[in-house]
Amino acid sequence: MPLRPICLIVIALLLPSAALAGKYNPTLSIGDAAPDWQGLPDTFGEPHSLAGLKDREVVVIAFTCNSCPYATDVEDRLIALAKRFNAEGKCALIAINANKVAEDLPPQMKERAEAKGYNFPYLFDETQQVAKAHGASYTPEFVVLDKQRKVVYLGAFDDSADGKNVQHKYVEDAVAAALAGETPVIAEMPAKGCAVRYVKERRKK
């Protein structure tokens, strides 16, 4: 078979899988239904679920951790945003940690949450399946869901890794658009941070 037809066949086989992912996210695309999750414990051991947020019009999921400097740099901005959300009562902010290194385990999560005064649930994804289902690659990385629990934004919190000289508040703008029933002007931006520390699976013999 000539080389050109072979190349076209390969491209055709690759396209369907590529169409399932977003511009920067390897798993989700804008408009996808949110992956369901349940039973993730917070720093007090209380379980949380996506269904438990049904009274909120918009949900923001922040994949974060203790050990990444990029994640700690965004903490104060998250706390400020959650304060506003809690006052308005229309949006929920949930933080999820999937790392299993010593500094990111539940006791350290609780210590960090108490020291910083987290005003949002900080959940532990022990199996790492929730993070994988959302295509989370970095900490911090954000997913914004609308009232129908469709994905309306994926990626970075804003355009400043350290919170200085912020020009574009991607997550806040996406939330405002979703509450208004509109599509965010910017729906995807690449996340900047530390790689999520997924446990490598051993190859089966």
Image: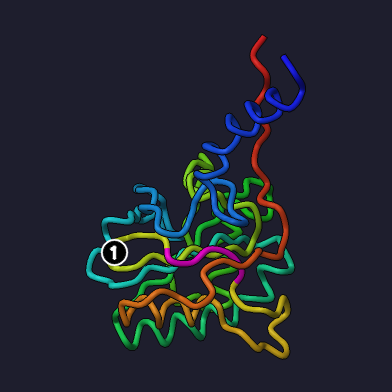
Amino acid type, mark 1: Leu
User: x, y (%) of residue 16?
Assistant: 52, 37
What secondary structure is the stretch in magenta mostly built from? strand
Please report the residue visible at 28 percent of the width from the left and 72 percent of the height from the top: 57
199 is higher (above) or lower (below) than 107: above
Of residues 1 and 39, the one nearer the viewer is 1
User: x, y (%) of residue 177?
Assistant: 40, 80
The residue that label 1 is drawn on is: 53
* Quarter the N terminus occupies: top right
Please report the residue visible at 35 percent of the width from the left and 82 percent of the height from the top: 86
Please report the residue visible at 71 percent of the width from the left and 53 percent of the height from the top: 195
| Outermost residue toward the top in this view | 205
Of residues 125 and 12, the one nearer the viewer is 12
Q: Quadrant of residue 48?
A: bottom left
Q: What span is in magenta? A: 152-156
Judge left or right: residue 12 versus residue 180: right
Please report the residue visible at 67 percent of the width from the left and 9 percent of the height from the top: 205
Is any part of residue 91 visible from this angle?
Answer: yes
User: x, y (%) of residue 168?
Assistant: 61, 84
